[in-house]
Image (cartoon, helix red, strand yellow):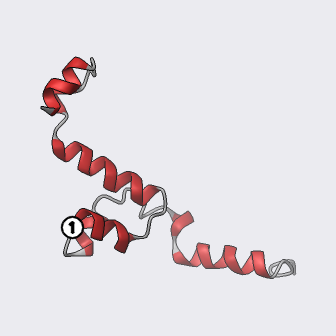
Amino acid sequence: MIQRLVIKAGIPAAPSITPHSFRHTFITEALSAGVPLQDVQDAAGHTDPRTTRRYDHGRHNLDRHPTYVLAGHLRRHNPDMGSE
């Protein structure tokens, strides 16, 4: 059914689109949008969070590293921090 629909829609990549493509896109986009890993894991039905993390293509982005996120949070709540 999916193949019929994507062909009818004229999508050039139609032969490579599968039900898993939609699942992959959902998980990847949810993680990119900032939905917590545990919530995406639950929605995907993954028992192991490592399975869900494989879809998180931005997980190695330094802007998301806990140290940078915490520093930004502290800076917002203490504007004088780091002005020395």
Q: Position of residue 30 (x, y in %)?
A: 40, 57
Q: Which residue is mark 1?
A: 45
Q: Nearer the viewer, residue 22 or 82?
A: 22
Quarter-of-image position of residue 63: bottom right
Q: Residue at x 45, y 56 (%)?
A: 32
Q: How many marks?
A: 1
Q: Nearer the viewer, residue 78 or 84?
A: 78
Q: Quadrant of the C terminus?
A: bottom right
Amino acid of disc 1? Gly
Q: Residue at x 25, y 72 (%)?
A: 50
Give left or right: position of 27 versus 13.
right
Q: Position of residue 80 (x, y in %)?
A: 87, 80
Taking 25 as reference, is 57 above or below it?
Answer: below
Q: Residue at x 80, y 79 (%)?
A: 82
For disc 1, the neighbor class at 10 Å (few under 14, some 14 to 19, many from 20) is few
Q: Nearer the viewer, residue 66 or 22?
A: 22
Taking 2 as reference, is 20 above or below it?
Answer: below
Q: Quadrant of the N terminus?
A: top left
Quarter-of-image position of residue 59: bottom left
Q: Nearer the viewer, residue 56 or 40?
A: 40
Give left or right: position of 69 versus 14.
right
Q: Position of residue 42 (x, y in %)?
A: 28, 70
Q: Residue at x 24, y 50 (%)?
A: 23
Q: Secondary structure at mark 1?
A: loop
Quarter-of-image position of residue 4: top left
Taking 8 as reference, is 22 above or below it?
Answer: below
